[in-house]
Amino acid sequence: MSDFGGKLRLARERRGTSLQQISATTKISIAALEALERNDISKLPGGIFSRSFVRSYAQAVGLDPDETVHEFLDRFQATTPLPAPSQVGTIHATNPEEESAFNSRQRIAGVVLKLLLISIPLVVLALYFTMRTRVPLSSAAPTPTPSVAVNSRPVASEPVPTAVPIGTSPTATAVATAGASATGMKLELQATAECWVRVTADGKRALSRVMKQGEKEIVEGQDRLMIEVGNAGGLALSINGRPGKPLGESGRVRTLNITKDTVAEFLQ
């Protein structure tokens, strides 16, 4: 395949994975990943490092690592640039043992990062529940409030009627009150298939991850919600309890810019 970088980019988009996610997983700069997708190998360090970049990218997007590296060598081996003079002495001739050790170190670093990402929320959660169980003795039993008897016979309190303007029904008044108290936009997302989602609420990043089938997320914003989805057919949304329109077919990448003035355009 002549467009080697295009094949990598297509595999990434089909999985709904962003370059930022691959960079965070593989520790490869976004500039190098973009160059790889453009077939611009002059931006890569060369030698074992280029092959390791290709192998790590392939693993991140679900391609066969060995087959992808083989295609990379067939496509670029004759045109691979020599390392820059500043790299002489730091990039040596490589062998399979060195490449295997380098890949092993990358895998270990990835495992350590994942363990840290899992353990930190668990520690915070444990501390939260520990603090909640420490209830002060002074708040264990509320102080009874003394009551004053007015007379021997209880007097039943009568409900105070609520004044309703002439020509307005009580139901219409309740609906108007509920509408007036509602502020902002409550966005509910549900993944019907695996897809990558990023949500920015009022200019601040609120969500950025791959959602698995069946997972749900809720994001609230006041004036603006920007939604980026890598698999439009795998995501359903609702705003303030109202279901939204279908976002598109499976595998399509979409960006939605929702404001208070345009929210009705995205609802059924």
Image (cartoon, rainbow, N blue to C red):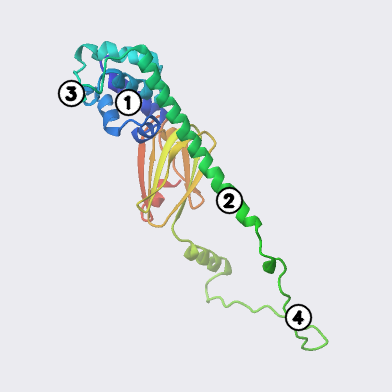
Kindly give the residue lying farthest to the bottom in the view shown: 151
Q: CA distance from mark 4 to mark 1?
A: 75 Å
- What's under tag 1, amino acid-wise? Arg
Residue 17: quarter of image = top left
At horizontal 35% and vertical 41% (from top left) the residue drawn is 255
Q: Examine the rendered structure and indicate whether residue 251 appears above or below residue 134.
A: above
Tell me which numbered mark, 3 or 1, is placed earlier along the sequence: 1
What amino acid type should be assigned to the residue bearing mark 4? Ala
Q: Earlier in the sequence, mark 4 or mark 1?
A: 1
Check disc 3 and report the residue beneath it. Answer: 84
Q: Amino acid at mark 2?
A: Leu
Mark 3 to mark 2: distance in Å?
51 Å
Residue 202: x %, y % from top left = 37, 54
Name the residue: 71% across, 65% down. 140
Residue topped by disc 1? 9
Count residues near mark 1 (Cα–Cα under 10 Å), then give few for <14, some for 14-19, many for 20+: many
Label ID, residue 127: 2
Q: Few, some or many C-alpha atoms within 10 Å of disc 3 (few <14, some 14-19, many ≥20)?
A: few
Q: Residues within 10 Å of mark 4 (few under 14, many from 20)?
A: few
* Residue 156: mark in rendering: 4
Left or right: residue 69 compared with residue 175: left
In this view, the residue in front, 29 or 47, is: 47
Instruction: Report x, y in % for residue 220.
Output: 45, 53
| Position in image of residue 126 (x %, y %) | 59, 47
| Whole-number angstrom distance, CA of label 4 to CA of label 2 | 49 Å
Q: Of the two numbered discs 2 and 1 on the same chain, state the one appearing first in sequence.
A: 1
| Cα–Cα gap, marks 4 and 3 | 93 Å
Q: Residues within 10 Å of mark 2 (few under 14, many from 20)?
A: few
Say whether residue 16 is visible.
Answer: yes
Q: CA distance from mark 3 to mark 1?
A: 27 Å
- Of circles 4 and 2, which is in front? 2
